[in-house]
Image (cartoon, helix red, strand yellow):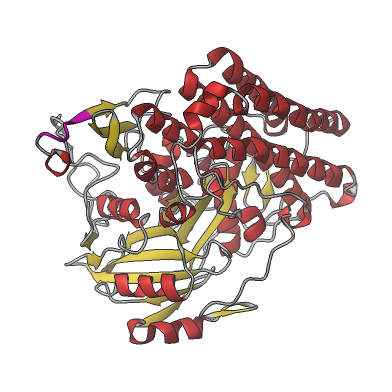
Amino acid sequence: MSLQTPSPDLDVGETPEGLDFDALADLLDEHVLEREQHINTEGFVVRPDEVETVLATLKREAGFDHCSCVTAQQYQDRYESIYHLKKYKDPTQELSIVVPTPSDAPLSQSATSVYETTNWHEREAYDLVGIEYDDHSDLRRILLPETWQGHPLGLDYNQKKPQVVPLREHANPVEEKTKVPGESDTMFVNIGPHHPATHGVLHLKTVLDGEQVVDVDPDIGYLHRCEEQMCQQSTYRHQIMPYPDRWDYISAGILNEWAYARTAETMADIEVPEYAQILRTMSAEMCRIAAHLLAIGTFALDIYGDFTAIFMYAITDRERVQNLLEDLTGQRLMFNYLRLGGTAWDLPEPRDQYFEKVREFCSYIPERLEEYHNLLSSNELFQMRVMDTGILPPEEAKNYGCTGPVARGSGVDYDLRRDDPYGYYPELDFDVITDDGCDNFSRALVRLEEMRESAKIIEQCVDALEDYPEDEREIQANVPRTLKPDPDTEIYKAVEAAKGELGIYMRADGTDKPARFKIRSPAFSNLQSLEIMAEGEYVPDMIAALGSLDIVLGEVDR
């Protein structure tokens, strides 16, 4: 149950009240040059040539097995990489490792030997900011074309400079490694980009040995608009909130908005009224159901082209949720419903009719799920395609920074609604769904059963809203019209979005706009695990694995 958390054995630097940062500093000894105070945790400043040693020690001896995010930024006098570390068993135990490098030589040691997930994160840091990572196995651009000139989030980047991007011929990137005379014959195959078959404009550079996948390299960036820079050019109070809807645009907008709201509200010490927290929680779980329905429907389409049954079932049910969200927010996709300090408005009138619609939908979900199980999970063709394919062992899921249904489908019991509670979740009773099958089938089952739990959460929120005293229904806190956090205030906060941990790092510079705004996309880290899931599989199994990740390229690319 969500309220029943076991008491694990204490690790190095851990106390019953939280982390003992002094003990962690002693563990790292002379490697810690300085200690910083971030809002969510402390930051240990280390030398750029000691990154691997520091992170390996923290992972092995202090239990920091989750590198949640890597943030890169440039100051006037230096570059900086921040490794945001957590523990899968308790994400409230956080530590930031800050790695400064000089402006004239932005070179830092890579962390890929410790956390595989940093492969893509460091490539993004190199691509957008310009920091190079020594001993990185594949340091090249990831969001922009390889021929791009400059680094868009660098302070000296000239946005007016024209870019010339020539078309380059593809080559087999692992031909010499895999071609053994008389034994193997590799072939390079381009899969995508074609929407919706690859869940957006995703290009998979695939190498086959016969009919088996030897190597797959997801080529992303086709949708990249530098959303982080857009947010850095917008004000905290009014202009940033509409952007999160556009990251995971598959009905998950309120979950995205909440990631920014939680971060900014914590930074500005804004206390959200309980009534508004209930509204947020109810609407967020509606978005989760809508997102999972589309994930299940398109997954069936990927597996055996079932457009008429499962896909139309899912779209029809998603429309029911969309109607409820439209009544509440006025929008069907880009909701823009949350505000810093609360929500834009209260429930639609008459309230009783709206509650009746919501309750009817919540009672409908369990019955409908039985039909989904009959049509999908009990379908022999579906089982043949997804059982024991796309295997992602739990340790590999952690190493790649996977979260959400992808991690829980590998038996990783990690859910921020319970483990780092926010909103109205601490007052609710719900189960965190996990499955230890570690395959494509498990990830589908987790999403199906999570919809049942979301319906339970929504019903409890309706109960609370119905009984809430009319004179105490505050939808917003008293928030200053202009927010200007103190200079060098730093924070990283996250929520449990439909696809996993959606986090945001912000650094203030004393103005009404963030100096750095970094988005930790769950789909970005989850997609990176496709490499381990597809290796040795057949092409149809790789397509199934891709579908089981439920990516949206708007969130991957940002």
Q: Residue at x 82, y 41 (%)?
A: 462
Of 213 and 278, which appears nearest the observer? 213
In the image, the segment drawn in magenta is 182-188
Q: Where is residue 515 in the image (x, y as percent from the top left)?
A: 40, 59
The vertical placement of 172 against 42, above or below, is above
The vertical placement of 31 against 193, above or below, is below
Of 307 and 474, which appears nearest the observer? 307
Residue 296 seen by the camera? yes
**The magenta stretch spans residue 127:** no
The vertical placement of 262 against 51, above or below, is above
Task: Tell me how many marks there are.
Answer: 0
Residue 482 seen by the camera? no
Q: Residue at x 35, y 30 (%)?
A: 538
Residue furthest front in the image: 182
Q: Where is residue 521 in the image (x, y as percent from the top left)?
A: 45, 47
Q: Is 417 on the left or on the right of 275, as rendered?
A: left
Q: Is 490 on the left or on the right of 19, as rendered?
A: left
Q: Is 249 on the left or on the right of 53, as rendered?
A: right
Quadrant housing the N terminus: bottom right
**The magenta stretch spans residue 184:** yes
Q: Where is residue 405 in the image (x, y as percent from the top left)?
A: 56, 44
